[in-house]
Amino acid sequence: MSNKYGWLIYNGSLISNKFTEINNRYKESAKKKGIDLDLIKNNEIYSLVENGSTAIKMDSDKL
């Protein structure tokens, strides 16, 4: 397990094989550096103000 964790938020509308390959290459490169990287589509994540505090919501269970 790695010590570092991050998100790569990418354009969810760009679904060609080339963009998928590039995103997976970023994920593999991060892993080599000890970073666990989640790939997240920008159309699956939302920032909002809820009860006076900022929050991040997602369509999936990645949070």
Image (cartoon, rainbow, N blue to C red):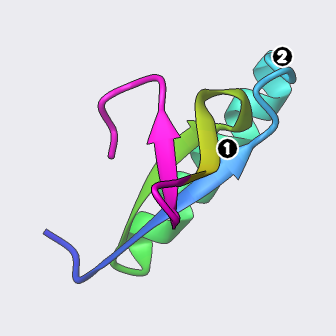
Depth check, front residue: 54 or 15: 54
Residue of label 2: 16
Query: Could you tell me residue 38's position as x and y percent?
Result: 45, 49
Precedes in sequence: disc 2 or disc 1: 2
Please name the amino acid that badge 1 sits on.
Asn
**Which residue is drawn at the image coordinates 71% and 28% (left, top)?**
43
Residue 53 counted in the magenta span: yes
Please name the amino acid that badge 2 sits on.
Ser
Image disc number at residue 6: none
Image disc number at residue 23: 1
**Which residue is drawn at the image coordinates 30% and 30% (left, top)?**
61
Query: Where 63 sits versus 18, above or below?
Result: below
Q: Residues within 10 Å of mark 2 (few under 14, many from 20)?
A: few
Tell me which segment is drawn in magenta: 50-63
Query: Could you tell me residue 12's position as x and y percent?
Result: 76, 27
Q: Is residue 48 left or right of residue 5?
A: right
**Which residue is drawn at the image coordinates 41% and 72% (left, top)?**
32
Q: Quadrant of residue 40?
A: top right
Query: Could you tell me residue 62's position as x and y percent?
Result: 33, 39
Whether pointer 2 and pointer 1 mark residues with C-beta atoms closer than 8 Å, the reply is no
Q: The N terminus appears in which quarter of the rendering?
A: bottom left
Q: Secondary structure at mark 2?
A: loop
Q: Secondary structure at mark 1?
A: helix
Q: Is residue 52 left or right of residue 5?
A: right
Depth check, front residue: 43 or 40: 43
Q: Residue furthest front?
A: 51
Depth check, front residue: 11 or 36: 11
Query: Could you tell me residue 29's position as x and y percent?
Result: 54, 65
Q: Residues within 10 Å of mark 1 (few under 14, many from 20)?
A: some
Depth check, front residue: 13 or 23: 13
**3D distance between C-alphas at marks 2 and 1:** 11 Å
**Which residue is drawn at the image coordinates 71% and 38% (left, top)?**
42
